[in-house]
Image (cartoon, rainbow, N blue to C red):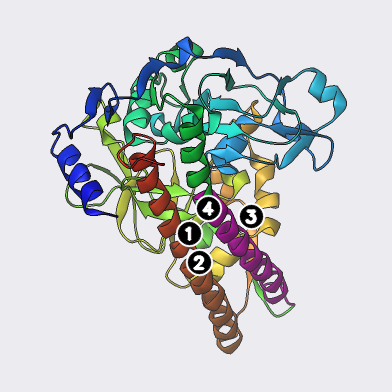
């Protein structure tokens, strides 16, 4: 980064206009950039149909609103899921360059997440998706700019609801946008940011391969033997119902498919909390934690972070000190166990079906009783967990680099020639 750019960043941080820059509703941008609203430069429509159980591996490419949260980041070049011709008839067709916004979610901070579809063939968008097409501005550029902190805050403040949060077409229409006057510059910015997407996707694929190997090995070493003892889960797990208000005592964390993390730039949306006296659930190190509605997506893990608070919608179990947390996590997060416990899911909407804490601990599991055997298994478990942790830390580093570049490039702090 050259000295001129460093000085410009310093001025903008101090809210001082650099030469040839101007103030806009989403920040300081170059004077030759255009400020507008999405409703003035494109057309909106709605996704339809495609419940989760209709998705399959072959057929017409499709994107469900849950896919936007869990499978794609800014750009979708190839749809992972597919639907039959019959289901496609009840859905909405999309083309290359189409933007997709999520219309509902669990929290205001994630609402209105945006991706741009850049596939080579037409695809289909499901319900709870707001569709947007613009001929004036590159779709990839808009998608990346929607990842800036300013626009995330704008969408979060427009969100409505509590247990399920919604954002509507009229809200999205009002979202401001700033962009270069030429599509060439817009496309150059988008293409540059996509290089990080490629690195991120490569790293994710590497993690998937290690996790697949881990699953294969764990299935072998955790196959119950005749000598293993059957233990009721109620003897092992006890739901922790401890609450606390936000203070300096406990850090505020989030629970995701990647584990438990402190709410930093990626997750911290404390400005959204209207009730300053809100009670959060307390979780302690080595608790087993899960999201009742996202158990199907694998949002369950051991708390390796430490004592903290998180959303009261999550469940946190204290583990009986007689039992080893590492082997319990391996068993209780396995697809073998989760497929059994999901029979207790309640709810009419697939994406919102949840498993209550009391139902989670209804069954029994088998555990090794021989200490030597137990230690051998735990050693293998820890080796794989450490490898995956290292690869995920590398992924987070690349993602943070991309987020920084999104702020710099899509607001013109750094110009692309």
Lower sequence index among marks 1 and 4 = 4
Q: Is 380 rendered above or below residue 216?
A: below
Lower sequence index among marks 3 and 2 = 3
Q: CA distance from mark 4 to mark 3?
A: 17 Å
Q: CA distance from mark 2 to mark 4?
A: 19 Å
Specify start and end residues of the magenta stretch as a single range. Answer: 196-225
Q: CA distance from mark 2 to mark 1?
A: 6 Å
Mark 2 vs mark 4, foreground winner is 2
Name the mark on residue 132.
none
Q: Nearer the viewer, residue 348 or 181?
A: 181
**Residue position for label 1:** 395
| Quadrant in which residue 329 is drawn | bottom right
Tag 4's secondary structure? Answer: strand
Question: Residue 2 appears at what percent x and percent y?
Answer: 26, 54
Q: Which residue is farthest right?
A: 85
Tag 1's secondary structure? Answer: helix
Quadrant of the image containing the C terminus: top left
Q: Are marks 2 and 1 in contact (CB under 8 Å)?
A: yes
Question: Residue 267 appears at what percent x and percent y?
Answer: 36, 43
* Mark 3 surroundings: few (<14), some (14-19) or many (≥20) residues within 10 A: few
Q: CA distance from mark 3 to mark 2?
A: 34 Å
The answer to whether residue 317 of the structure is visible from this angle is no
Residue under the image location 44 percent in, 43 percent down: 314
Relative to 331, 248 lies left or right: left
Name the mark on residue 363.
3
| Quadrant in which residue 116 is drawn | top right
Q: How many numbered marks appear?
A: 4
**Residue position for label 4:** 300
Q: Nearer the viewer, residue 12 or 187?
A: 187
Lower sequence index among marks 2 and 4 = 4
Q: Nearer the viewer, residue 303 or 91?
A: 91
Tag 2's secondary structure? Answer: helix
């Amino acid at each position: 980064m050259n000295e001129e750019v460093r000085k410009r960043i310093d001025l903008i941080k101090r809210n001082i206009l650099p030469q040839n820059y101007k103030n806009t509703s989403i920040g300081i941008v170059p004077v030759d950039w255009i400020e507008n609203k999405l409703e003035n430069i494109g057309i909106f429509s709605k996704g339809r149909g495609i419940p989760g159980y209709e998705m399959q591996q072959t057929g017409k490419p499709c994107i469900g609103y849950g896919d936007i949260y869990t499978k794609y980041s800014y750009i979708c070049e190839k749809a992972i899921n597919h639907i039959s011709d019959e289901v496609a008839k009840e859905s909405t067709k999309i083309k290359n360059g189409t933007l997709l916004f999520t219309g509902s979610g669990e929290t205001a901070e994630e609402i209105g997440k945006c991706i741009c579809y850049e596939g080579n063939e037409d695809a289909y968008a499901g319900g709870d998706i707001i569709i947007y097409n613009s001929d004036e501005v590159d779709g990839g550029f808009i998608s990346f700019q929607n990842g800036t902190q300013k626009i995330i805050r704008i969408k979060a403040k427009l969100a409505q609801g509590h247990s399920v949060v919604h954002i509507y077409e009229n809200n999205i229409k009002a979202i401001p946008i700033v962009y270069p006057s030429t599509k060439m510059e817009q496309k150059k910015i988008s293409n540059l940011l996509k290089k990080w997407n490629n690195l991120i996707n490569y790293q994710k694929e590497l993690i998937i391969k290690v996790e697949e190997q881990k699953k294969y090995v764990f299935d072998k070493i955790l196959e119950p033997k005749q000598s293993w003892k059957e233990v009721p889960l109620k003897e092992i797990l006890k739901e922790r119902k401890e609450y606390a208000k936000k203070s300096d005592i406990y850090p505020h964390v989030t629970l995701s498919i990647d584990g438990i993390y402190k709410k930093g730039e990626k997750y911290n949306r404390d400005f959204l909390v209207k009730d300053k006296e809100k009670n959060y659930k307390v979780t302690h190190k080595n608790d087993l934690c899960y999201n009742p509605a996202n158990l199907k997506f694998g949002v369950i893990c051991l708390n390796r972070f430490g004592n903290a608070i998180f959303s009261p919608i999550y469940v946190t179990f204290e583990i009986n000190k007689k039992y080893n947390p590492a082997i319990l996590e391996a068993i209780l997060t396995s697809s073998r166990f989760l497929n059994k416990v999901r029979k207790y899911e309640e709810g009419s909407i697939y994406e919102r079906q949840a498993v209550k804490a009391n139902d989670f601990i209804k069954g029994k599991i088998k555990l090794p009783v021989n200490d030597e055997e137990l230690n051998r298994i735990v050693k293998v478990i820890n080796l794989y967990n450490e490898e995956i942790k290292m690869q995920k830390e590398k992924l987070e580093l690349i993602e943070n680099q991309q987020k920084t570049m999104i702020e710099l490039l899509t607001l013109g702090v750094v110009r692309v020639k």
